[in-house]
Amino acid sequence: MAIKTLKKFFTGPAPRIPRNEAMKVFKRDHFQCQYCGLDGLYQFTNWMILTIDHVHPHARGGARRMDNLVTCCQPCNVIKGKRLFKSFEDAKQFVLKNRQEWYHLYEQQVKAHQHSGTVSH
């Protein structure tokens, strides 16, 4: 059995957070991603991508307590992943730096696409 499979067997998947608990976190955080600031109350699409992040990842022993849970958009949650950080601020700096790098890549791809003369619908 692979080590990854054994680890998942012992730690299990990240716990599903009941809707009422998730709403407590969202309300506390004003429906805003605590990493990038995405405002979930600004428009429905933003609200739909809000998730709950374990600051100290569950897969690495993080508890499902209010002081370890933050509102997070899915892109920031994916960027942060299961990495361990000394503090929330370190995690936030990592996420924002990576978002900026991805944004620059996005801009390059858009420019390349526009200059190639390809029309998209």
Image (spheres, helix red, strand yellow):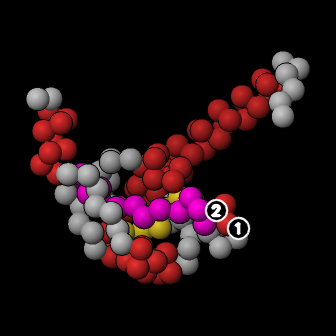
Name the residue beneath numbered marker 2: 46
- The numbered disc on residue 104 is none
Residue 41 placement: quadrant: bottom right
Looking at the rendered structure, the kind of residue marked 1 is Gln
Q: Is residue 2 above or below residue 28?
A: above
Q: Which residues are drawn in magenta?
A: 46-60
Choose top left, top right, bottom left or bottom right for residue 118.
top right
Residue 63 location (% of width, % of height): 23, 66
Q: Nearer the viewer, residue 85 or 21?
A: 21
* Residue ID for mark 1: 43
Judged left or right of residue 96, residue 22 is: left
Q: Would residue 98 appear left or right of 88 to someone viewing this image? A: right
Disc 2 crowd rating (10 Å Cα; few below 14, some 14-19, many 20+) is some
Label 1, label 2: how far apart the Cα atoms are: 6 Å
Residue 32 vs residue 5: left or right?
Answer: right
Q: Is residue 17 visible?
A: yes
**CB within 8 Å, label 1 to label 2:** yes
**Residue farthest to the top, as pictured:** 116
Q: In which quadrant of the rendered image does the C terminus lie?
A: top right
Q: Amino acid at mark 2?
A: Asn
Check disc 1 and report its element: helix, strand or loop.
Answer: loop
Q: In this picture, is 108 found above or below 84?
A: above
Q: Please report the residue visible at 40 percent of the width from the left and 56 percent of the height from the top.
A: 90
Q: Residue at x 15, y 29 (%)?
A: 2
Q: Nearer the viewer, residue 81 or 87?
A: 81
Is 70 part of what is drawn in magenta?
A: no
Residue at 80 percent across and 29 percent down: it is 111
Q: Secondary structure at mark 2?
A: helix
Instruction: Please name whichever residue, 31 or 97, is drawn nearer the observer in this view of the structure.
Output: 31
The spot of residue 57 in percent (x, y) is 29, 56
Locate residue 82, reporting x and y percent. Answer: 33, 48
